Image: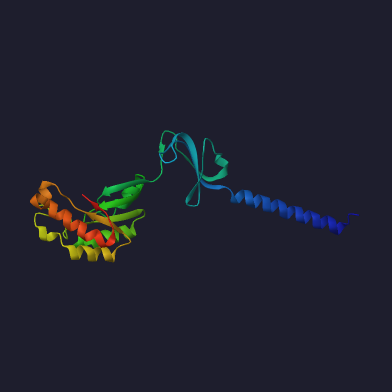
Amino acid sequence: MLTRRSLLRRTAAAGVATFSGMASVLAARYDLVITGGRVIDPVDRLDGSMDVAIRGDRIAAVQSSIAASDADRVIDAHGKLVVPGLIDIHTHTRLEQMPSTCLADGVTSLVDGGSQGADRIEEIIEVARAAPNRVRVLLNVARTGITRPVGEFMDISHANIPLAQQAIERHLDLIVGVKARLSAAVAGANDLEVVRRAQTIVAPFKLPVMV
């Protein structure tokens, strides 16, 4: 026999179950849905009009259509490209605003291509650590960094092996290799010696040389 007490107990249990179900639906919602853009992703061979859903800091779904009601925020990307974060492997972050400018253009990761050498590497490292995107650094083999109008390797003493290695040791978390500019106006007849010193610099760290 269904008593008043048991009826109340069942009603309360049903209410809890309904609330739990609603909570799980709300938890499954996306933070953001980007709709109608041309999605291009070479890795997954995607190229077409699709919707992209984001939850937290992850792509949660890429589908032909995602309901706008499933998201807290919707961006209409019709007529625009939607791509994974771009990687620029050769730029120069001399100005503090450069990483932010790159991020505004969709560049989420970038590598400074030897703007500075051992003498002033801290300037680039400071920019890299404060950047809103992922910034890595190629140390210029020349302690002076890029010099103009006279190229940095016209004086081969600028390619100082111990100083370069010390700079790398200090910042192994951000320095991903070394850069050696070898054009005639930069290295002249010293080009092959610059390569030799560059290889010597990176050998203990197993890092690459960009020329």
Residue under the point 41% across and 36% down: 80
Figure label count: 0
Q: In this view of the protein, which residue sits in the foreground, 176 or 36?
A: 176
* Left or right of 207 in this view: 52: right
Residue 78: image quadrant is top left
Q: Indicate whether 160 appears above or below 183.
A: below
> How was this image coloured?
rainbow
The answer to whether residue 152 of the structure is visible from this angle is no
Residue 196: image quadrant is bottom left
Residue under the point 74% across and 53% down: 15
Q: Quadrant of the N terminus?
A: bottom right
The spot of residue 176 in percent (x, y) is: 29, 56
The spot of residue 113 in percent (x, y) is: 24, 51
The answer to whether residue 121 of the structure is visible from this angle is yes
Q: In this view of the protein, which residue sits in the foreground, 130 or 60?
A: 60
The spot of residue 146 in percent (x, y) is: 17, 54
* Left or right of 148 in this view: 40: right
The spot of residue 30 in percent (x, y) is: 54, 47
Residue under the point 34% across and 56% down: 131
